[in-house]
Amino acid sequence: MNVKALLICLLPSGLCAQGFAGLGTEVDGFAVPQPAPEFSFPEDHGAHEDYRIEWWYLTANLQAADGTDYGLQWTLFRSALSPEDGTGWQTPQLWMGHAAVTTPTNHYVSERLGRGGVGQAGVTVDPFVAWIDDWQLAGDWDHMAMTASGPEFRYDMKLQAQGPLVFHGDDGYSVKSAEGQASYYYSQPFFDIAGELQLPEGTIAVSGQAWLDREWSSQPLSGNQTGWDWFSLTFDSGEKLMGFRLNQTDGNYYTSATWITPDGDATSLTDGAFQAEPLATNAQGVPVHWQVLLPAYDVDVVVEAQNDNAWMTTSVPYWEGPVTVSGSHSGRGYLEMTGYD
Amino acid sequence: MIRPTLQALLSHWWRNPLQLFTLLAGLALATALWSGVQAVNAEARASYAAAATTLGEGQYDRLIEKDGQPIDVATYINLRRAGWLVSPVISGRLNGVRIIGIEPLTAPGGIGAIEMADGADVERFLAGQGQMFGSADVARILPEFDVILSQNAAPNTAVTDIGIAQQILGRVGQIDSLVIAPSQPVGQSDLGEIAPHLVLQAAQSTSDVAQLTDSFHLNLTAFGMLSFAVGIFIVNGAIGLAFEQRRPVVRTLRALGVSLRTLVWLMAAELMLFALIAGMIGVALGYGIAALLLPDVAATLRGLYGADVSGTLQLRPVWWLSGLAIAMGGTAIAAFGALWKLSRMPLLAGGQQRALAMAAGRRAQGLAVAAGVLLGVYVLLCFTATGLIAGFALLACLLIGAALALPWVLDVVLRFASSRSMSVTAQWFWADTRQQLPGLSLALMALLLAMAANIGVSTMVSSFRTTFTGFLEQRLTSELYIDTRDAAQAESFVRYAEPRVDAILPIMFTQISIANQPVDIYGTRDHTTYRENWMMLAQAEKHWDTTFAGETIIVNEQLARRAGLAIGDVVTVQGRQMPIAGIYGDYGNPIGQAIIAEPLFQTLYPNVVTDRFGLRIAPERAQDFVADLVRDTDLTSAQIINQAGIKALSLEVFERTFTVTSALNVLTLAVAGFAILMSLLTLAGMRLPQLAPAWAMGMTRRRLGKLELTRAVILAALTTLLALPLGLALAYALLSVVNVAAFGWKLPMYLFPSDYLRLGVFALLAAGAAALWPALRLARTPPAELLKVFSNER
């Protein structure tokens, strides 16, 4: 899944006391995901303004010609302040962009905030363009172009889909707690990606795999859930695993996972099938070293951060970075951890 | 040992409560005026700081339209999409409240200075439901809005979302400026490609209010310093006197074995205690003065500079402490001489009046030399001073120099009088006056300074008023002024008015930059109104002809002075080279101004909407025309201003400016009068040994009393006479140096002899009144007291 960072509050510091825990609050008037969804494309690639939160979330594991690993993140969040309509500055649709590049030694982060209605940020369906300021993800979902920039970095990437869309949970209806909170959730995990990173270290040509998540809901977390640990792993065998663990205030957690074959067949696994246990933390106390188990598929792997310090210093801070997988399966992937600030 | 010593020292004050009062009152008054002025300044500066933070002025660079017009939203979005992290700001006024619209999601940190307090609802703020942040006064003036009280809000300012601000200001889709975030991303496009019509305004060069008002505050500070100096004169006098009178006590105490070091420390401690007490009283008084002055200062600043200053005073610890520190520091300065003398005093020395007077005479000569140097510097600065600081240095040299010269000048005059007098009584009178001079000289210096300040400032104010009223007469020639709502209303108004009035003079202007100075440039219609009424300070031949032909430009004095421009110099306007054909006086305007021909203006700035007009119409028809206009068009009477109304408004602004000045003037004069009273009272006690022999030789007490009174009046008269040239020199410096530096224009100096005469009479009356009490006391001194002098000679 990708119950990613969110914006109860988009405004900088001071307002964000709620943080991720705020995702569990009830808001009246918004549409609520219903089981057995029927998606319609390309419309559903666009924004669903009657839902409170939504994101277009891309992560990529990249490699330079010299073999150095890099991680890349491009995210656009939408958050509606109210279900009502408004035009121009009065629109309740707020947007937030997060972009990052992770090198073995550095983690460059940038954040953009904006609001819909005046053209600063938004998503159009035909042609598909998701943008905030100069950041953009555009294309027909088979071929895409992506760019983002920050004070220290910039990247321009081309993406090419090598497989179908994958729907998580029950055909894209992804349950997030025992109480039944849910979201709509699908991915395009089969992107080949190539392009240039402009970093203080220099301009670097890179290529690799990218994973694009789409998710929207109005209340994806239960009131007692404080954050999550989310894994998207691509094994050398071509199989892929998306798994997450939603952490509760009582120390228990709720897990969910999707097993994806190399040709895109997906199997959803319910609570308990996916297990993830922290093995070691970084200096900040964030677990950057995990044991991940999926007994149904004989997966017993160790997941290690490529750079322990991939902390997103954004309005709502979290950890997001590339990982290396070893053990029963080897490969690479992305790890996101929230609720550790 | 310390306790009895302290008791012995303090007993002096018990026996001379008046001296103690002088000391405390002088110090308290000095502190009060100083800290009062500082409080006003601090309050105003805090207001500017809050306002500047709200807009991010001086902190962030910004983009504005080259021709001063609003920026549209499309330009803003284009910039954002090209990687320019800019945030839109709009500001305007609603019912006098400054409305600032910001875009909270893109605004760089700190801008807006909104603390989302309890009750703040992000959603409402962002979703355009009318929430704004402001102080209590804003909530009062704008009851129809959802105003959230904010501690750190700038006075008279409401911060709200740009969407709301655009609506309530009636400027939908408009942006005044784009604040540039300090950190910009890699690889953003070139500004010239995306928005060639925008220019970057660096944070430093933003002509912010604080800079603009600096001169005003420096003026206030100078007044505060003057008052403080006068107060310190009093304190110095009181301390000096007390030390002289305590010489016998000191002699006795030292003979009893108290070490000199202990004595000096005890006396210093004693003074610091007094300074602390007086300082606290002074700070409290200062608070009162500041609270009284602040509303007028706030009104002045708003009127002159458009600066919003809180009308209510807040207690700031810094200000409290600095008030106390200045009281202690002042005492230390005032007491240093006395303590130094004490530490050098021979063990058995007592006080000798005549010896002291002679020593004072020698000191006066030293002072006169210092005075000569200072006055020399003054003359030098008169020709060279340019900046405001130099201007005040010049004033300081003049005033201190003159004050220091006073004892010597008076001594010379009195010696001359003495040598010319025949009768024994007269000779004694003059000699006695000379002897009294050292004791009185500090009070007289205070009087001199107060008088000179009064003459100087009142000359400046009156000159200003005379010039300004004349200027308004010339400048506000149109009988009516119309302020239309928008281009459409302006057009229909012109259509309506054209056949009905003698002339319509459109007032079209925009803010640009000429020679790196902010300038309001006006497009002016060729009409006799301008040719006949606008007085040029300097002009080229046929300046109006060439200007109306679009060949030349006419600038105001402020611009000419600040940019160092003269007739014939060429300036660049929108890329066009234009020689200057005229420089006109533009009193009361803080910024630069320029005039070009109407057609040229329209070519250069095609987007500027003209919505204000001057109307020439026979005055007797004006009333009817206004009635017709309101009846036949959708203009409201609030949009029509008659000439008299504007004049009254303009004059009121300046009257208020000078209310503050004249209030400080009166206070200074009062302090000086008090100084004389206190000096005379303290001297009276000391002078008995001088007077007793005269009484013993047959001069009645009544006669002695009369002579005392006469003496005070003569000394005051002499001081007043000296104050006149000093005051005029001060006025000259204020008008020609300080004013030019502060405001950018030079004022012609007018003389107001009747004012000076009245002031002189007041000074004499004040001195007479101050001397009356000591004289009466002398006239009523019991003979037994006078006799005691002979039995109890020191």
Image (cartoon, rainbow, N blue to C red):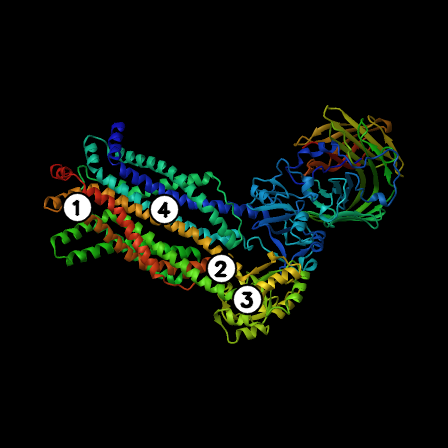
- Residue type at numbered disc 4: Phe
Is residue B168 something one can see in this rendering?
yes
Q: Earlier in the sequence, mark 4 or mark 2?
A: 4
- Residue type at numbered disc 3: Glu
Task: Give the percent coordinates (x, y) of residue A59.
Answer: 77, 41
Tag 1 subunit: B
Q: Earlier in the sequence, mark 3 or mark 2?
A: 2
Between the residue at mark 4 and the residue at mark 1, the CA separation in whole angstroms equals: 37 Å
- The residue closer to the viewer here, B57 or B690, is B690
Task: Give the percent coordinates (x, y) of residue A93.
Answer: 74, 43
Instruction: Pick out the residue farthest to the left.
Output: B697
Between the residue at mark 1 and the residue at mark 2, the CA separation in whole angstroms equals: 56 Å
State the residue at coordinates (66%, 32%): A284
Task: Give the percent coordinates (x, y) of residue B288.
Answer: 42, 41
Tag 2 subunit: B
Q: Quadrant of residue B344?
A: top left
Tag 3 subunit: B
- Residue placed under numbered mark 1 in the picture: B702
Are callouts 3 and 1 both on one chain? yes
Position of the C terminus of chain B by quadrant: top left
- Residue placed under numbered mark 4 in the picture: B228
- Residue placed under numbered mark 3 in the picture: B620
Badge 1 element: helix
Task: Give the percent coordinates (x, y) of residue B210.
Answer: 51, 51
Of circles 4 and 3, the one toward us is: 3
Are callouts 3 and 2 both on one chain? yes
Q: Which mark is residue B588?
A: 2
Badge 2 element: loop
Badge 4 element: helix
